[in-house]
Image (cartoon, rainbow, N blue to C red):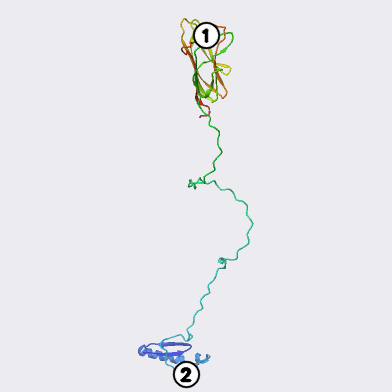
Amino acid sequence: PGFGVRGHGIESRLCYLGDWGRVTSLLWASLLSMGPRVEEKEEGYDPQLEKLPPPSKCTRCCDSGYVTFQPLPQPQINITILKGEKGDRGERGLQGKFGKTGSVGSRGHAGPKGQKGTVGAPGSGCKNHYAAFSVGRRKALHSNDYYQTLIFDTEFVNLYRHFNMFTGHFYCSVPGVYFFSLNVHTWNQKETYLHVMKNEAEAVILYAQASDRSIMQSQSLMLELREGDEVWVRIYKGERENAVFSDEFDTYVTFSGYLVKHSAEP
């Protein structure tokens, strides 16, 4: 099928080409055999190798007969990513600007129940917020040369004894707004002239003209009192003939009052 020719450092295998191929092969062989061989000049050349049978395939004559391995590239390490030793603590920087106020957070959960506290000191006594009285008179009264305090002899209601039956005065112990009413029976042919007094000032007047008939006359009012204020009734002095009627069998004159609202209440 073909033959091999060695020369000028190359080894070629000529394939079978028929008669023309044989002639061409002989010409090439003649040309290659002329002159000194390159192989003979090389160091380590052995002529005995010419007698060995041709190899089974074509190879480059300049290649080494041994398998060589290319060295693997060494990996490059980026030293900037390697962690070094911890440095010294730097100086403290300046305080930054205050940030914007944040929004109010949601309500937190209730905390655990605390321990029971100690018993406190006793408090002061509770003041009563009530005041009321209602008194009457069963004796007639005529005016004289000076003002007279209307004294009452019958006690209907006197809560906490705020009305003094001996002086005829109501003494305010609970400050607030009070309601008062005065009812009298007039005398025939005489005037009836009285004042409801707050301390030493005239608050209202009860008046009835002289008449052939006696009648019931009344007056009422509301006063705002402070603790220690006094309310009472006086009959006008004797410049005029005035009087109030009553007898020992019936009560014709009454004076009443009670607390409407305590001053401490809203």
Residue 164 at what x, y percent from top left?
55, 20
Q: Mark 1 points at which residue?
A: 243
Task: Sort mark 1 into few (<14), some (14-19) or many (20+) by Cα contacts within 10 Å.
Answer: many
Earlier sequence position, callout 1 versus callout 2: 2
Residue at far right of view: 91
Label 1 vs label 2, nearer the camera? 1
Q: Is mark 1 on a helix, strand or loop?
A: strand
- Are circles 1 and 2 on residues that touch, CB within 8 Å? no
Residue 170 at what x, y percent from top left?
54, 20
Residue 262 at what x, y percent from top left?
51, 27
Identified by mark 2, the residue type is Gln
In the drawing, does residue 57 fall left or right of residue 99?
left
Q: Nearer the viewer, residue 246 or 259?
A: 246
Q: Mark 2 points at which residue?
A: 48
Residue 169 at what x, y percent from top left?
55, 18
Query: Is 112 placed above or below 63 here?
Result: above
Q: Which of 97 and 158 is in front in this view?
A: 158
In the drawing, does residue 164 fall left or right of residue 22?
right
Q: Nearer the viewer, residue 208 or 40?
A: 208
Query: Is 99 placed above or below 221 here?
Result: below
Query: Is 264 placed above or below 201 here?
Result: below
Residue at far front of view: 248
* Residue 215: mark: none
Q: Is mark 2 on a helix, strand or loop?
A: helix
Task: Sort mark 2 into few (<14), some (14-19) or many (20+) by Cα contacts within 10 Å.
Answer: few
In the drawing, does residue 134 fall left or right of residue 199?
left
